[in-house]
Amino acid sequence: MPKIKMPKSTPSIDMTPMVDLGFLLVTFFMLTTQFRPEEVATAATPTSISELLLPEKNMMLLTVDKTNKVFYSFDGQQTRKDVLMEMSAKYKVDFTEEQIHKFENISAVGVPIGALPGWLDLEGPDRKKYIEKQGGIPMDSTNNELKDWLYFSRMNERNITNPYRVAIKGDRDANYKTIKRLMKVLEEVKVFKFNLVTEMKTK
Amino acid sequence: MAEIQSGGDDGHKKGKKKPHAKKQSTRIDMTPMVDLAFLLLTFFMLTTTFNKPKVMEINMPVPNDANTPPTKVEDDITTTILIGKDNKLFYYEGVFDPADISKIKKTDYSKDGIRKTLINKNKKLYDIISEFEQQRMDGKLNPEQFKDTVNWAKKQKTNHGVFVIIKAVEDSNYENIVNILDEMQICSVVNFALVDITAEEQKMIETL
């Protein structure tokens, strides 16, 4: 059968508007992306079907990473300073003005109080290395620093209308023993209502 | 700017000999730049819609002071879930019998495991809530009404099918606990409690 050749006409599309829009969108997203605050420890949380959102502010966040170390974050510059001063007085550990200033600007506590001044003086990657080796806030019955951090935070809470909410962000592989102890410490500071941070999952 | 031309015209020019003038072509192919722009766009689109971490609400019981007696639950309608190490999961019904190991049944975290068991025991409440969910999907109930009716249904004592006691060994994963607490929500179980495991129970499941 003879092949019928169709006359080939070539459309030439002007791509200018498309590229313009592309760059506009890139610029928009570049300006509106907000970076997550630097975390002291990473925890891969387990999944749940719960759809409630984690509050961004006014939160006392207890992070348990997979090596069962406990970290504590809370915000509010003035509150952080007050809590640090109370802890400093109780445990007889001194802080310089510069260290206090640095502490006000980060959100987490990751080391025992004795090591905190030294840790505040370190920079970025050194801090992480320190935490890997001996990080975590002690919460055993002989040395329950965590209880004091929580107690002083609640005492110095400034926002009465929107009080602190407690959340536990645990890693999937964290030991139940640590979580159990954590819940016991929360009970000792009279916190009975708290949230567990999870990722979304479908039924 | 960029023009897309295909070489389809050559069919016509077979007969003619076109003298090729030596011209310097200054056309820049913009394709790689557009590719990069789209890559960047996709990257930012995806990073700004990062998964916002969700939370589960947990209300732990207030420890009883000496005056209030602890709430007593009839032993024979309880189901106890035992969480072992290495993602093992067991359950038994009623009172713990240290002599009878066959009473402890092995199960797992999948849909056919503990979820199936719990839904069967809690069938009445589960069906009621599934009905409400269906109504919400069909649009007959708005989210506010849905929440109110579900809360009302959960408060009716006649709907309560099962009391669940959750006990975990210290070596278990945090993930296991969260999964079980999640199953409580999925199966619409209203009454559950997280308690310490006894030594006898722990010894028994170690052998299984």
Image (cartoon, coloured by chain):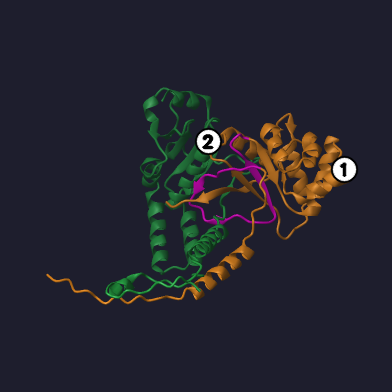
Chain colours: A orange, B green
Q: Residue at x 61, y 43 (%)?
A: A42
The kind of secondary structure element at disc 2 is loop
Membership of A63 in magenta stretch: yes
Q: What type is the residue that disc 1 sits on?
A: Thr
Locate residue A187, reporting x and y percent: 67, 41
Q: Identify the secondary structure beneath mark 1.
A: loop
> What residue appears at the point 83 percent right and 44 percent down from the top-left corner?
A99
- Is any part of residue A61 visible from this angle? yes
Q: Which mark is residue B9?
A: none
Q: Is residue B3 above or below residue A80?
A: below
Q: Is residue A182 magenta?
A: no
Q: Nearer the viewer, residue B46 or A202?
A: B46
* Picture quadrant where residue B196 is located: top right
Span of residues in magenta: A41-68
Q: Which mark is residue B173?
A: 2
Density class for disc 1 (Cα within 10 Å; few <14, some 14-19, many ≥20) is few
Type of amino acid at the residue the image marks with label 2: Asn
Q: Which residue is mark 1?
A: A96
Depth check: A168 or B205 in front?
A: A168
Q: Is residue A136 visible?
A: no
Q: Which of these two is toward me, A94 or B132?
A: A94
Name the residue rendered at 47%, 63% in the picture. Answer: B146
Residue A54 rendering spot, x and y as whole percentages: 60, 54
A119 and B15: which is toward the camera: B15
For label 2, the crowd category at 10 Å Cα-Cα, with few meaning under 14, some 14 to 19 and many 20 or more, is many
Would you identify the image quadrant in which residue B67 lies?
top right
Quadrant occupied by the N terminus of chain A: bottom left
